[in-house]
Structures are given as structure tokens and as C-alpha cells.
Image (cartoon, rainbow, N blue to C red):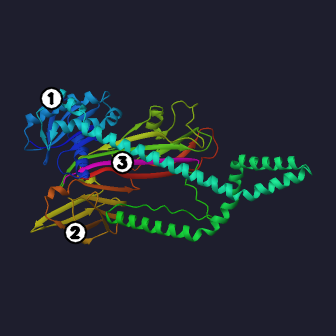
Amino acid sequence: MVVLAASIISKSGKALVSRQFVDMSRIRIEGYLAAFPKLVGTGKQHTYVETENVRYVYQPIETLYLLLVTNKQSNILEDLETLRLLSKLVPEYSYSLDEEGIGKTAFEILFAFDEVISLGHKENVTVAQVKQYCEMESHEEKQHKLLLQSKINETKDVMKRKASEIDKSKIEKNRGDRGGFTSLQSVTSGAGFGSDTAISSSSGGFGGVSSFGLSTEGESFSKSKVRPSSSASAPPKGSSMKLVTKQRTNQFLESLKAEGEVIVEDVRPSGGQSRAPASLPSDPVTLSIEEKLNVTLKRDGGIGNFDLQGMLSLQILQDDGFIQVQIETGDNPGVKFKTHPNINRDLYNGENILGLRDPNRPFPSGPGSEGVSLLKWRMQSADESLAPLSISCWPSVSGNDTYVNMEYEAPTFDLQNVVISIPLPALREAPRVQQIDGDWRYDARKSVLEWSIVLIDNSNRSGSMEFIIPAIDTSDLFPISVRFTSTRTFSDLKVISVLPMKGGNPPRFAQRTLLSAENYQVV
């Protein structure tokens, strides 16, 4: 038996806690976990689901799933026994079995998972033993903490002594610099009292003491006066220090870039330039049409899942919220629309007008108002031709190398900012890209090859890429993840006009349309 990973996920496939017991890339385990909710049935307490590569052994725990990802050669009876033990341990460490409770006790749960499973194999332990192992104290750890704390305390004492020495040297320096001022004050005080020498001398001595007593105020004033002159003479030294620091920073950034990290440099505007304000909606009425795609394509052809969810939202910046929205829907019979409970359904079904059920109640409006949802829709299908982008991967192993040919096709949709992420095993060098339509980037830290196309339109409905890597198991190239956006939607919904309920001219409105790939994979 080999357990690849033990995870706690939400019903939508979001990973809350996941512990991998074999070498596995992050994008690969995320792909496995994201594909699981689409495979699971309903009305079952605990069971298993098999795919071409792995087996899912799971058990619902309230609104979450406790999940084991194993290979297909593992013993299902031992897997179920491991699952039962983990299901008893999770409530011991997380008293609320929801996302917040699991997130607060994530590390405790991970430590418990490690006590139950070692290198993918179940240990012969009980719940009581696991709790005892996790709570055991280490004498060496205590000694290490005591030694560390003693070093911290010793460092603090040294810092205090150094600070007191610096303060004393500052006081001595200021006292020496202010000696001329004190003597001048003494002479002036004596002259003011005339010929009485005793009073003159005592007043001179008092002048000296008072000037020392007010040294705090005088010191701050003298520093503020002297600091500009000292700083004026310091720029050569300061600028050289800044230059060295900047060179070291640049070297550090270059090393991070070589490792595949994306570095966003902070470019600050000069003093004479004013910072441009962030772009905000300026139209009185803004209507946003947004659709999100969740698609799972199979590597050998066919489609595993096609789920589209859309929403029409309204934002009113003007003070008048008494409006109605006239819309027009497309001829796609697979799209099922659903209005908000406060929307007048009879008006929508009869005239395609979205208005509130209570005509005396306005929509939220004003400069600080947020968008409100008017209409939602959903579309599910098993037709592969509906996918706006299809990906084909043809790997072949020859000797010590693996030759990978990839193709994309976008028959109907114009797509922007397309990024195709191919997971790879850890490589010493970047893949050798022989031919590509577009650009490529290799993230060495995540071990992912990204194929990017800025725009797909009628000029490049299809494209290909070929690269070479060392010989690997071709299943490691999956799942392939895809990101893109488009201004065309499946619903073909359009806003015709905005109708004022109190009469007058229709307000100016803006319409924004966006289709995005939320979870688009080839498995």
C-alpha cells in the first residue's frame, strides 16, 4: 500500500490541509484535489473512486471531505482502516469541523497525519498513542530553548551597556561644546548686576548650572541647527553607501530571477511628478457581465466536466436608484437563467426587463454603493466542441530524452492572455524549446513550463510548441492548467437600455463583459 497524500478539502475541491508522502509537485496534487469533487457521488458515507492513475478513498466530515489519494495497487481494506483512524483524529485537534477551525489547527493535524502514515505506509498506532506522541516533551528541545534564551538575554545586556556608553559620550561632547556659551552667560549675568562682585559671581555660577540643567532643550536645538551642515558634508559617503547597497540588491534580485522568481520592481515617481489616481467607474450606471469556466478535458480526447456560471451585476453611482434594466439573451438553450429573489419575475419573463418587485424601493445607489447581483445563470454539458480551447499533448520517450509536442486549438472564441502551465519533474536545466508559437517561461522553483499567447484570433486559431526534457514518466506532464480571458460569453447576454422609472432621459451606462477560466485543466 502506498498513500500518496492525505488531505482535508471543501466540497468545491479547495485544499485546506494536505500532506504528501511521496515526491509530488504542488500543481499535480492541486490537480488531483480539484478533480475529486467532480468524481464523487452523493448519499454515501465513505467509499472510493478510481481514475486512470490514482484511487480516492474518502469520507465526508460535515461540510468537508477527508481524503486519501493512493495508487491503484494499494490494499483498499488497509486504506479504509487508515481513513477511519484519521477521521477519529481530526475531531481531537479541531473542535469545529469547518474551514476556519481546520485552518487554525492545520499544523497539529499535519503532525498527527505524520504519526499515522510514514513514507506512504500506515503505522500500527492508536488514537491514544498518536496523541501521546504529539504531546511528548523533548529534553534536548528544552535545553536548546534555554540556551537560546540565555543568548538573547546576554545580547540585550550588551545592547543596554553600549547604549548607556553612547549616551554618556553624547552628554560629555555637548557639555564641552556648550562651555563657551556657559562662560558668556556667566559674564553677562555678572555685568547685569553691576559692581556687586559676590552677587555677580554667584549669578555667574547659577547661570552655569542652569545652562547644564536645560541641556535637553539646548541639545535638541543645537542638533537641529548643526545637522544640516553635517549632512551637507556627508553626501559623498552616503551616496557611496547607497551605491554599494543598490549593487548588492541588484545582485540578489538577479539571483532570484535566475531561480525563476517573478520580481516586481517598485518604481517610485520623482518629486515633481504627481501619482496618477486609480481608475474608477465614472459612468452613472455600470453593468458587469461575468462568466467563469470550470472545464476538465481528457488527455486522450473527450470531456470530463463542463460547468459555466455567470452573473449580471449592477452598480449605480448616481443618486437616483429608481431604474430598470432591459436585456437581451442569446439563443443558447443550454443556459438556465435565475433572477434574484427581489426581482419581478413576471416582468422579466414577459418583457426581459429586470426591475425590483417593489416599485417604491430603489436599487442601492450613490458614490459609495457596491454592485448588486440581478441575474445568474449556469450551463453544464458533455459536448467537447463547446470548450473554447482544446489542448493536445504528444510525449514520446527516445533514449535519455522525452520529446513533447503540444498543440492548441481555439475554433470560435477570441482569447486574451492565454497561459498554458505544464508540470515537469525537477530539472537541473530549463527545457530545450525547439519550436513555439508564442512565448515560454520556465519557473524552476515550481518546476512548471508556461506557454503564453497574448491573443488568439482569426490569425492564429491553432499553434504548437515542441520541447525536449530528460526521460520521464509521461503521466508526470499532467494535469495541464490553462488560464485565459475573453470578451465573448456563452450566454450572449446584452444590456439594451436602462429605463428611468420617474421619467426623463435615460441615464448613461457602461457595459463590461468578461469570460475567464477559473479552473481549466487537461487530466
Q: CB atoms at circles 2 and 3 under 8 Å apart? A: no
Labelled disc at residue 292: 3
Q: CB atoms at circles 2 and 1 under 8 Å apart? A: no
Is disc 3 surrounded by few (<14), some (14 to 19) or many (20+) residues within 10 Å?
many
Q: Which residues are magenta?
A: 284-298
Measuring from the top left, give residue 185's x and y in whole percent: 80, 54
Three-letter amino acid code of the residue under disc 1: Thr
Measuring from the top left, give residue 260's x and y in whole percent: 32, 62
Of the two numbered discs 2 and 3 in the rendering, the one whose residue sits closer to the viewer: 2
Secondary structure, mark 3, is: strand
The vertical placement of 372 against 186, above or below, is above
- Give the camera-side residue of 222 and 389: 222
The vertical placement of 485 against 4, above or below, is below
Query: Quick check: can you spot residue 10?
Result: no
Q: Which residue is mark 1?
A: 126
First-in-chain label (3 vs 1): 1
Q: Main secondary structure of the magenta part?
A: strand
